[in-house]
Amino acid sequence: MESTYSKSLLVQEFEALRFVFGDKKNSCTGDALQKSLQPAALGLQEPFKTVAETLKVPLIFPRQVHGVEVLALKTKANVQKALEHHTDADIISTSLEGVGIGVLTADCLPLILYDPEVHACAVVHAGWKGTLKNVACEALEHLGCEYGTSPEHVLAFFGPCAHVEKYSASTELLKLLSGSPFRENVLEDREGVIYFNLPKMNELQLRACGLLAENIHREFCKDTITNYAYWSYRRDGESAGRQLTVAMLAVKE
């Protein structure tokens, strides 16, 4: 597919947090990060250009590897380095105002964590592999270690991803999930086919790590497989594009 974009970008706001959960109207090719020689060059291409201009910030996306590595942007020097060289990570965080951080997804769960008390946020790429490595809790723990956040103050915003209705579980997924205390809560057996509840797994993990149930927001968590407004790798295969998820911190009043 080709990169697509819409000049009408829906930016959500919560206190000093600004964020975007994109759909096909604001999407890119699956290999956009691999093709880009420098992260800064992404800002010259659509849909990144429109998002950057709308939010009035530079954008930084890590190269996702389905793990738990972190790219922390705590200083302007960190930002400059991240704009010059790609970093492999599935968690990206910042406490700096005016910096856009994001991930690309097409069935994997994009997750935004935000602590308004200490003014820090993280964006997480939580596919099933990262989820079984507890990537959401790794991000929550990282925010605490690096920025001094407390789990009870953190809000979680779930973006569009594959839902349990059509998300059939692979043999590898089931094997890796065998030792999880949440196994029975996140699997559904329908006519001999096992389906996996990706957002519920992340929600249960976060709650086990101290995040409050009332601080979990799933109103943006649409189903990418059945909703054709989104790209889905499981539905569209190699032709699937990638939705953008971007978060930034505005000046705290």
Image (cartoon, grey):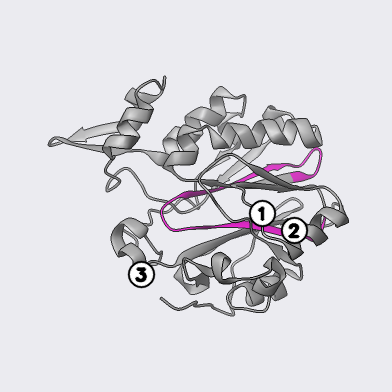
Task: Answer whether residue 178 is visible to the viewer in this image.
Answer: yes
Q: Residues within 10 Å of mark 2 (few under 14, many from 20)?
A: many
Note whether 234 is above or below 3 in the view shown. above
Residue 158 % position (x, y) = 53, 46
Q: Which mark is residue 239?
A: 3
Q: Is disc 3 placed on a helix, strand or loop?
A: helix
Give the residue drawn at x 58%, y 39%.
68
Eyeballing the image, is 130 above or below 177?
A: below
Q: Work out how far the residue at label 2 is from the one at label 1, CA to CA, in angstroms.
A: 7 Å
Amino acid bearing label 2: Ala
Q: Is residue 181 left or right of residue 61?
A: left
Q: Which label sits on residue 82? A: 2
Q: Tell which of 143 and 222 is nearer to you.
A: 143
Give the mark, 3 or 2, whose residue is nearer the N terminus. 2
Q: Is residue 162 above or below residue 38?
A: above
Q: Is residue 102 magenta?
A: yes
Which amino acid, by three-letter code, is at mark 3? Ser
The span shown in magenta is 97-120
Residue at the spot of label 1:
87
Above or below, 45 against 70 in this view is below
Which structural element holds mark 1? loop
Check the picture and name the quadrant holding the N terminus: bottom left
